[in-house]
Amino acid sequence: MSIPLSWYLILAATLFCIGLYGVLSRKNAIAILLGVELMLNAVNVNLVAFWRYLNPAEMAGQAFAVIVFAVAAAEVAVGLALIISVYRRQKTVVADEIDLMKW
Amino acid sequence: MSAEQILFILVGVVILGSALMVVTTRKLIHAALWLVVTLFGVAVLFTLLRANFLAVIQVVVYIGAIAILFIFAVMLTRREQMEKGRQTRPNWWIPALLGALILTGLVVLILNLPGAERTALALPEGLDPVRALGSALVSPKAYVLPFEVASVLMLAALVGAVYVATVDKK
Amino acid sequence: MNFLIWLLPLPPLLAFFAILLLTNKKNALSHWVAVGAAGLSWLGSMIVFIKALGVEEFGKHIFESSINWLPTGADWFRIGVQVDPLSAVVLFFVAWTVLAIFVYSIGYHNFGQPKGDHDIAGLQPHGATVEEHGHKHMVPSIEPMYARFFAFICLFAFGMYTLVLSDNLLTLFVGWEIMGLCSYLLIGFWYGKKSARDAAIKAFMTTRIGDVFMLLGIAFAYSFSGSLSFRDIFQPQMLQGLASTPAFFGLSAAGVIGLFLFIGTIGKSAQWPLHVWLPDAMEGPTPVSAMIHAATMVSAGVYMVIRMFPLLSIDPHTMTVVAVIGSFTALFAATIAVAQNDIKRVLAYSTISQLGFMIAALGIHAYVAAAFHLVTHAFFKALLFLGSGSVIHGMEHGVLHTGKHVDAQDMFNMGGLRRKMPITFWTFLIGGLALSGFPVLTAGFWSKDEILAEAFGNGHLVVFIILAAAAFLTAFYTMRQITLTFLGKARTNAAEHASETTWTMTIPLIVLAVFAVGFGWVGIPEHFPALGGLLPNWFHEFVGGTLAEQPEAVAFSWVPLITSLVVALGGLFVGWLVYRKVFSPAEDRLQIPLLKNKYYFDEIYNFLFVRPAYWVAETFSSLFMDQTVIDGFLHSLARFSLFLGNIFRNYFDKPVINEFFGDGTGNVVKASGSSLRKIQAGRVQYYMVISLVLLVIFAFLFYFLKRGM
């Protein structure tokens, strides 16, 4: 017996929700980015699973996944640069303390 | 229960377990390392899905570059007192609840999806996934445009990151 | 000729404007302008009069000229001038007396004298100190408002000419009112004196009462006949129509109109009961008294009645009223005149009395006699007034000379003036004899005799007796006046030092005296013993022709002749007899309070009319109605709106609109803003939680909605 598609999808969904939890509940800004990485990975899993199960001849799924890789990399680079820059100013990386754009 | 399924379940447990560790562990450096484990597990998953190239890319880019970046960032922004005390915000149960709800919703959706029970078909004869992916990425009839845009995006990210992180030298 | 008639009133009017606007500051120029204007009008009047004499049956071929003036629908209202026999003789005496008075005024207001020491415009001049031969003495000073006086009398002359020459009731009324105005201005000429101001108002108000009725009469006449011109009203059919239409008070229309017009005359000619203004009008300068109260204004009232005679004579009730009032006034005023001490007051009451004669004559249909007496009276009364002015001037001179201030007008301060002021004396004597009706030689005799003859001859015995009694009193008080003033010895130092007045004053006296003597001879009745028939009764022929039917001369009778001789000569003799021995008011037995105080009519009117009028104006209208009721109402309205405003402001505007809506909205926005802004916490995870919550909610909503469908 092979693995049903739904297993992959459920796995991806769970990974996604764990990432979401991490994003929403961690204090450290870098920890939030870790959560974002988890979510992106879940998306990738989803994409590849659909590629394999629906139409492997069509490379759209993988191409999309490649793009997601690129985006994730770029985002992490910029995000970490920002966090470091903020750390230099505010001397903190706790997300709740970086609230200058409040009312 | 075939071998694939057992393998899948094992990999699944690894991935989810380490993901949980990522979001709950106290020390940030540990979280980063647990992330590496998760990424490995996802790479194995890709291999299971016959996306070999992506598995390799996952390891090289994600673990080799991004996770390293994370570790650098953690080390650069370290403070002693930061890692004492709670690492999660107060009211952490809201995101937990939210996540549970969304998970429930998604699961229900997935289970009701038509064709969710299908199994993987055999790959077509003569399909070379890597070669196909390569030509898809550069073929004008295919996905060269997103590819190029992604490169521009990377350029922008590169420039932006350098600029943001530069220290003003007076 | 007709064109000339239009021009006759013009010179005085132009002189009025010229003096007021141009020559106000120059005295000599002003009086030349005025006298010149009077002279021009006199010349024109003489030409017209002589031309009129030359016309055969003038009454039927009168000079007239009229123009279309007001468009009244399909027709026109015409105004114009006319000269018929009546207005010709009236024009004659108006022209002469006006000219004489104008010339007299030059001397009266002391032209050529220096300006006074303390003279102010508005008060009588008080004399100037001159240095002569080393010692100072006072001389009469020139009137400060000299030019103004001449301007006013020019306007007055204009009014009279307009009245005499008009051919319709409207312009007659215009002239009437102009003279009313001028009498106000001139009586109150010395407006600084309170008594003069009061007298002016009294004159105007009293004549006003008459004028209102007259206007009503004119309006009634117009509404009935559609025209106001004499020719139209005196058409036989029109008169018939007026006579047969019944109107108010049981009279016919003609009677009512006549009665109302007559009431105007009662006011203007100072008949009882509206006589109270004339004695007070003596406050004005003497030329004014002569003009208004002898020559022109009061005669205008009589002239108007004579003019409207065809209308008046229709209704016997109106004629009775006329005769009663006339004869009563004649006797009434004569009784008051005997107790007056002021030289001008005597003459004032004498005027009222003589006017009563004329009115009574008209009341008994003695048309020609009334007109005759009007003309002769104008001459001798003007003469008497001007003479009294001359006397007062002489006395003033004496007052200034002696320095002691006595009333220059009180006869009991005079005496023996015939030696000091001969011309004045003789002319005054002539005038006084004319007034008394001295036989043959004076004009007054002929006219008065004719009235008495008409009264007796037509059987109006009551009128005859009353008029005869009045004539006796007239002669009596006239002689009293002459005796006290001119005869005997001077009773005060001022009288001792009186002197004759200048030629500008005495020449007019002489001229008027000539007329006072001679004018009577144009009206000698045909059947008069000895003298009748020597001269034709020109006056009767001429003036009688004015009416449609020539009135018949009354048959001669000895009774009225003897009566008039007796009363005239007797009155003169008794007056001289009594008063040559009287030297002070205490000795004068006729100083009865009732007579001296004019039967208390002034006090009665004051009580009956003046005080209530003041009460209505001051207390009722002003204080009660105006201030308390109306102002009170307005104030309470204002207070109410203030109160309402307060309520609206404090109970609605502020709490509801300001605070609830205005501030409230602001506060709500502020509060909601200040609470809602806390959403923007600046914490990213917080934002994400919120958006995910909403996402979940919407996802559930959509899912279940989809499921439901």
Image (cartoon, coloured by chain):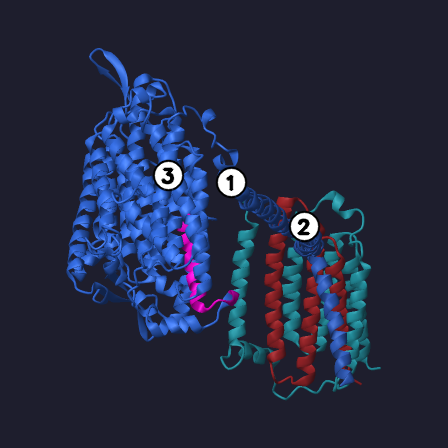
The nearer-to-camera label among 3 and 1 is 3
In the rendered image of this protein, does residue C240 appear above or below residue C7? Answer: below
Q: Which residue is mark 1?
A: C599
Amino acid at circle 1: Tyr
Q: Residues within 10 Å of mark 1 (few under 14, many from 20)?
A: some
State which region is magenta.
Answer: C249-271
Q: Which residue is mark 2?
A: C643
In the rendered image of this protein, does residue C382 appear above or below residue B40? Answer: above
Task: Locate residue A45, reporting x and y percent.
Answer: 70, 73
In the rendered image, the residue lying farthest to the right is B1
**Can residue C188 be spotted in the picture?**
no
Tell which of A39 and B13 is nearer to you.
A39
In the rendered image, the residue lying farthest to the bottom is B125
| Visual hue assigned to chain C | blue
Q: Is residue C254 magenta?
A: yes
Q: CA distance from mark 3 to mark 1?
A: 26 Å
Q: CA distance from mark 2 to mark 3?
A: 85 Å
Using the image, name the chain to which the residue with label 2 belongs. C
Compared across the picture, whether C589 is left or right of C70 comes to: right
Q: Which residue is mark 3?
A: C570
Are the residues under marks 2 and 3 on the same chain?
A: yes
Using the image, name the chain to which the residue with label 3 belongs. C
